[in-house]
Amino acid sequence: MIETTPLIFVLLLFIIILAAIIAIHKKDLLHSVILLGIVNTSLAAIFFILKAPDIAITQVAITAALETSIFIIAIHKTERREEA
Amino acid sequence: MDTTKHQGGIHQIIINSKKTNKAKTKNRLDNMDLIIKTITRVMFPFIILFGAYTALHGHLTPGGGFPAGATIATAFTLLVLTFRESEVEGRFPEIKLIDIKSIASIALLAIILFEFALRDIIIQYQIPMTVWSGGDTLFANIFGSIIVATGIIIIIYSLIKEEWKQ
């Protein structure tokens, strides 16, 4: 796997790490949730490349869609901006 | 020209605009944009179709009961998040959802319990590598997806209903 690592695989891993780090440092929680959606969608693409399409479908349906909507409802119930 | 009056006027306008912005952000879940509403209306049947495909083809292609149920629940979540209480009210009564979930659970339990008896009868009439194959797996996937979808819809719906009450 390491010898034949495609470039897109490395690119997706880089996007995941970058989006996760930005999501931690963002003060606006809605932006963090959107960045988490990017992380989860990229993770689903990685699962698809690793030949696990059923896991990819579940990952997209649960984490990228439902988790994001639940986070949005929770943010709407509390505070949008994190205290400095 | 009286500049103090002019400055006061601008100051008042800024304060008023801030107030209206606050009011808009407070009710942003109730008053969704026209673009979001239109895209939801267009995408809803396709998401349901993909969920149904995942459930019905679960024994032939990647998928199964859980991803199918989650996909269908995502479509309903989008609908409930986008539209107002008056537009959604009456279409998804919670008691009906619980009834559907209970019936699907009993059906799934019956399939699991009587699999040894049903398998031989069903397999006689099935054609391999088509949708009508795989023994009882097809029924298990369908009822499993219904259980997952109704469960997630009840959770999201009860969360949103609290929001509507406020």
Image (cartoon, coloured by chain):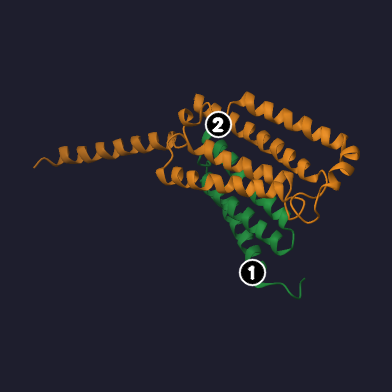
- The picture quadrant where one finds residue A47 is bottom right
Q: Residue at x 49, y 39 (%)?
A: B82
Residue A63 seen in this snapshot:
no
In the image, B132 versus A25, the foreground residue is B132
> Marks 1/2: CA distance?
39 Å
Tell me the shade of chain B. Answer: orange
Near-viewer residue (A49 or B66): B66
Vertical placement of B164 versus A55: above or below? above
Residue A8 disc label: 1
Across the whole image, how many numbered discs are drawn on residues? 2
Mark 1 and mark 2 in contact? Answer it, CB < 8 Å. Answer: no
- Image-quadrant location for residue B23: top left
Placement of the N terminus of chain A among the 4 image quadrants? bottom right
Chain for numbered disc 1: A
Pinpoint residue A25: horizontal percent, then vertical percent: 56, 51
Q: Foreground: B144 or B134?
A: B134
